[in-house]
Each structure stands twice: as structure tokens, then as C-alpha cells.
Image (cartoon, rainbow, N blue to C red):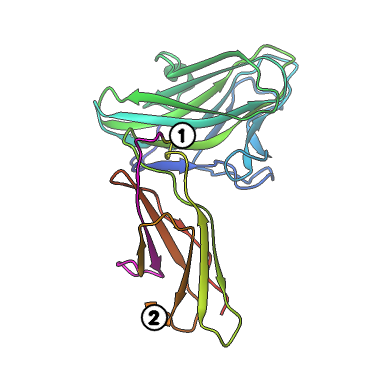
């Protein structure tokens, strides 16, 4: 039918910035944009520093009441298991209305028959970015869409949405930040890695003192075993022949562990030897 997909739901965890640039078509087409009001205003890519990768989806000023949907691809969820839905929002100035749903349907009228997982009424963030983490439990095993419905009154301004995460509600630290790999000048065969340790979990929530740093593993290329395991909260490491480094281009992956839980990996671009 018009409102169903044939493909199976994506496995979790799922993360998406939705937008990949600020051009009209610079967004993940697995997301569905619906302009129910059939006016000239719809969710579209925009740039917004501090939200995800610096890009997001924006719904602009409308002289009529907003009635616009932004719907994710199908995500596979197990019945009875708790998940966290995380997303970032901002507004230009005015009080806006936005409801968030989790539904097996792509049909807006069917989606609205369910209870929203979050409702943001008359919210105004004045260009500040707010991250939200909402616990949800699927009623049964199936494929679900995360749906954002903007329904602000007429003559309201911009709503921004992005930085989407959907994952099982299990603690994991965020990945290391600002990971870089800098090769030494020839003929010295060395690559210096640097990073920052996370202060939040994968949902963006500050880690308390009960979350203890354990170790950090560094992998080169597609090696299954780390070339180094650091236990002293270091934020730099120098790879060289002692660790098996040979001349050529290399990528590095870093995983950090807190309280027995592994972070998602952070990865560098290939080094330029």
C-alpha cells in the first residue's frame, strides 16, 4: 500500500544526522518527508552548528498552521525491551508544537491514533540546542518508525531536528572525541594519535563518578586484535615499528571502556604516507 515498505527494519543501534549538507536534496532518502498542508513549506536540510554533524532538518516560517511529518526508516525492535530514543531540537524564537511518535505505520492518520512518546508544546529554544532522551518499550516485536509531527500555530518560525539515536537502554560510554592520526615527516616511521576521553554516555548524559574508566584499545586497519591497550587515561599514543607499523596508508580505530562497557568505535581517515 501507499504507506508500507517492503524492506525489513534496520537493526539497532541506529544513529542518523538525517541531513548530510544544506542543499535541498542533502538528506537520507530513507527518511520520509510529508507536507500534509500541501503548502510550500516542508522539512528540508539546513546547517546548525552544534547539532550532530552541523546539519539537520528544518521546518521554516509558515503563515498557515504547520502540519508536517518527518519519519524515519523502519527500525526493528523487540517487544518488551526498553530502548532510548534520543534527538536534538532547536527553534528560532516562537513557541512551537512538535509531537514524537513510534509507530509501525507510515500513514500519518494511523500514527496519530497512537500515544506520542513525547510532546513538545509551546516550546521555544531561541537557537539553543536541547537534547532529549526518551525511554520507549515496543508493545510487540516488529518494525517501527520514529515520526516527528510539527503542528505549530500559524505565523510561527523555524523548528530544527536532528542527531537521532535509537538503541537499547544499556549503558555505554560515548566514543572518544577529536580523534586524529598525524604521521611524522619522512624518513621517521611514526604516527601520533590523539583524542579526548568522553564525559557522557552514548545518549549524551553526563557519566557519574560510578562510571569508572578501565581501558582504551587502539586498532590499526582491520586488525582484530588491538596494537595497544592503555589503562592510564592517556590521550595520546605513538605508533611505530615496535608495534608492527610499516610504511603505507593506515586507519586507526579506538574503543574506550568504562565500568565494563565498550564505547562505539571512533575511526580516523587514512594517514597520508
Identify the mark at residue 242; answer none if there is no mark.
2
Could you say where residue 8 lies in the image, as x and y percent from the top left?
33, 41
Name the quadrant containing residue 47: top right
Magenta region, residue range = 208-226
- The mark that comes first in sequence, 1 or 2, is 1
Judging by the rendered image, the residue that carries numbered circle 1 is: 206
Q: Quadrant of the N terminus?
A: top left
* Front position in the image: 162 or 127: 127
The secondary element bearing badge 1 is classed as loop
Identify the mark at residue 78; answer none if there is no mark.
none
Name the quadrant containing residue 216: bottom left
Question: Residue at 28% across / 46% down in the picture?
Answer: 260
Could you say where residue 235 lies in the image, as x and y percent from the top left?
49, 58
Could you say where residue 72 lies in the image, as x and y percent from the top left?
47, 34
Location of residue 144 with respect to 18 vertically, above or below: above
Magenta segment: does it hold 178?
no
- Residue 170 shown left or right of residue 90 in the figure: left
Q: Quadrant of the C terminus?
A: bottom right
Name the quadrant containing residue 106: top left
Residue furthest out toward the bottom: 187
Amino acid at each position: 500500500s501507499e504507506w508500507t515498505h517492503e524492506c525489513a527494519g534496520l537493526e539497532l543501534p541506529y544513529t542518523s544526522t538525517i541531513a548530510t549538507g544544506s542543499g535541498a536534496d542533502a538528506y537520507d532518502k530513507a527518511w520520509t518527508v510529508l507536507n500534509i498542508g500541501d503548502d510550500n513549506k516542508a522539512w528540508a536540510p539546513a546547517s546548525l552548528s552544534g547539532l550532530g554533524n552541523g546539519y539537520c532538518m528544518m521546518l521554516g516560517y509558515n503563515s498557515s498552521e504547520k502540519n508536517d511529518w518527518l519519519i524515519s526508516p523502519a527500525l526493528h525492535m523487540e517487544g518488551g525491551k526498553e530502548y532510548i530514543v534520543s534527538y536534538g531540537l532547536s527553534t528560532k524564537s516562537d513557541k512551537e508544537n512538535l509531537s514524537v511518535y513510534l509507530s509501525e505505520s507510515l500513514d500519518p492518520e494511523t500514527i496519530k491514533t497512537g500515544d506520542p512518546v513525547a510532546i513538545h508544546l509551546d516550546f521555544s529554544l531561541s537557537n539553543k540546542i536541547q537534547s532529549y532522551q526518551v525511554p520507549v518499550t515496543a508493545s510487540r516485536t516488529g518494525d517501527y518508525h520514529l515520526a516527528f509531527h510539527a503542528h505549530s500555530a500559524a505565523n510561527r518560525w523555524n523548528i530544527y531536528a536532528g542527531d537521532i539515536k535509537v538503541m537499547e537502554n544499556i549503558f555505554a560510554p560515548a566514543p572518544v572525541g577529536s580523534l586524529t592520526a598525524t604521521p611524522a615527516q619522512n624518513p621517521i616511521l611514526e604516527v601520533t594519535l590523539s583524542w579526548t576521553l568522553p564525559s557522557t554516555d552514548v545518549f549524551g548524559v553526563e557519566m557519574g563518578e560510578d562510571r569508572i574508566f578501565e581501558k582504551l584499545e587502539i586498532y590499526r586497519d582491520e586488525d582484530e586484535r588491538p596494537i595497544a591497550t592503555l589503562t592510564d587515561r592517556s590521550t595520546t599514543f605513538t605508533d611505530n615499528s615496535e608495534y608492527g607499523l610499516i610504511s603505507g596508508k593506515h586507519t586507526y580505530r579506538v574503543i574506550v571502556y568504562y565500568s565494563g562497557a565498550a564505547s562505539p568505535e571512533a575511526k580516523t581517515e587514512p594517514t597520508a604516507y
